[in-house]
Image (tube, rainbow, N blue to C red):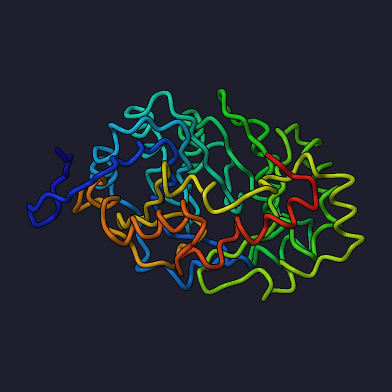
Amino acid sequence: MWTGVPSTNGIRIKITNMESKINYAYLETTNYCNLDCSFCNRNEVIGALKHMPLDDWKLLLSKIKDHPLKNCKLMGMGEPFLHPEFDLVTSEFKNVFPDCFVIVATNCQYSIKEGSKMRAKFERAIKNLDQLYLSIDGYEESYERDRSPAKWGKLISFLEDLKTVDKGKCDIVVNYVVNAYNIDDIKKVDKLRQDYNLGRLRLNIAQLWGAEDSLSDNIETSGYSIEQLNYLKENWSDKIMGKGNWEFPDCFWVKEGLYTTVDGRVLMCCMNTGARSFGNLFHQDLDSIRASDDFQNVKKGCESNNPTKHCKNCSYKELSPLLKELNVFN
């Protein structure tokens, strides 16, 4: 006896081991962005610029509503708050998944002055969020360099206006992407965080989000001096996100994760946003997508610690020795 799910052509697909339920999702609702950050490959991978219509959003949620999501990031290759109805995006998600922990990241490069439409949308949206990452990578000059065409003054204006925003229960934290050229600014940004009474500082070692890109090919992601590594280890290891002892069988994406784009395409993870999709949730059900040969080959490659080409430059794996050296074992 076997269990099957219908494919797009009506033929049932044999599944010997039913897939685990999804408990972590990364859902993109817009690919519009007002920045061109140095470590982002959006220009190489996005299609036509698009805000996901609410009807499509509701359809997507209906396709995953039976999965016990515990954590979800409503973001992707765009700035989430540029979606004209992002407040409704967040409320609709919470209607379907009231117990899910919802995270959004923002680049803070827009105005939330009192009385503005953006302010009203922002306040309505964050009431549906559990955590908001403020992306602040570097201080003044290095910030504007790595997050071009961001302006430091616009960030400060955002933080000033944020003081009077009704934050509800949303935990607002600082997310800092570390590279070889902005390490010295961590302390300055941490003080900024304290000055504005924000939540904890999260440090992420810079990653490259494409299968053909290797961290070793980029001096910013590989050119750390011994002094810099010692500085990170001695002062910031408890703030760095990641896992030092990581192998491909540890990958949760292939077992319990979901990444979808604004046009409904299903990717394996946020580490390889340029990969060919495994299917489209607007036209297929999730079970048949995950049961496909292409998906299963990637999954089995990770589980057997013999990754396919899809995972050859996985940043999780490439960062593992560095994180181990920095005593990071989250």
Count the numbered circles shown. 0
- At 32% from the left edge and 52% from the top edge, which residue is drawn? 52
Left or right side of 185 for 321 = left
Left or right side of 2 for 135 = right
- Quarter placement of the C terminus: top right
Q: Nearer the viewer, residue 116 or 233?
A: 233
Q: Quadrant of residue 191?
A: top right
Q: Quadrant of residue 1?
A: top left
- At 17% from the left edge and 40% from the top edge, which residue is drawn? 2
State whether residue 310 is above or below residue 169: below
- Which residue, as the protein is rendered here, is positioned at the far right? 227
Q: Position of residue 133 (x, y in %)?
A: 61, 42
Q: Position of residue 96 (x, y in %)?
A: 32, 29
State whether residue 66 is above or below residue 31: above
Left or right side of 163 for 110 = left
- At 51% from the left edge and 33% from the top edge, which residue is drawn? 126
Q: Position of residue 146 (x, y in %)?
A: 69, 65
Q: Nearer the viewer, residue 113 or 279?
A: 279
Q: Quadrant of residue 263?
A: bottom left
